[in-house]
Amino acid sequence: MIGPRKYRLVPRAPGDTSPVDPKIADAMRKAGMDPGKFTVAPFEAGEAAPQVAAMFPSGTRLEHTFAFGTLNGALSAIERIVDDDIAARISRQGAKWVVVFDGPADQNVPAKSAHEQLVGRVSDLGGDDRGFSHLTMNVTNYETKKEG
């Protein structure tokens, strides 16, 4: 059995004019987001490794998870939180939209305090707090040599 397909919102590359599904574009507009600034990209296990290495440096990270009853609430939370240091993944689980925010851990701020700050920023959007996780990322770059 193939599991549900997961997508994430990513900033559009310069010159990218690819269309966004009208339902997603409408939800983005309702959340106050400009569909011209974001696009949807699939998140699949096979493509995660190279993207992760490109997106995040090695080190300790925190993942903060929230479940929203509406796509509008989920997208609004993404717009509020995502920046140069924090990325987001969104997936559908039953009737809920689950958003996972991934950002660097600050050794001067306890993880629980950092998570409570995020809860405060999205609590008015109707998200259920599903907690946080510590991650340690070790990125290894492999280079290939051409023989010849």
Image (spheres, rainbow, N blue to C red):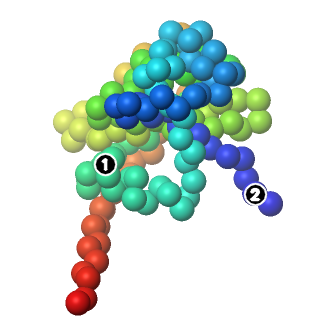
In depth, the one of 77 and 8 nearer the eye is: 8
Q: CA distance from mark 2 to mark 1?
A: 28 Å
Badge 2 element: loop
Q: Which residue is mark 1?
A: 56
Does residue 38 appear to the left or right of 126 in the view shown?
A: left
Which residue is rendered at x = 26% and y = 55% of the image? 58
Which residue is rendered at x = 65% and y = 28% of the image? 21
Residue 95 sits above or below residue 91 on the image: above
Does residue 5 appear to the left or right of 111 in the view shown?
A: right
Quadrant where the N terminus sits is bottom right
Residue 36 sits above or below residue 131 on the image: above
Residue type, mark 2 in image: Ile
Residue 139 sits above or below residue 4 on the image: below
Residue 95 picture location, percent across and down:
76, 29
Which residue is rendered at x = 43% and y = 60% of the image? 49
- How many numbered dots are placed on residues in this image? 2
Give the mark, 2 or 1, whose residue is nearer the N terminus.
2
In depth, the one of 79 and 25 nearer the eye is: 25
Q: Which residue is mark 2?
A: 2
Asked whether the viewer can see residue 128, the reply is no
Quadrant where the C terminus sits is bottom left
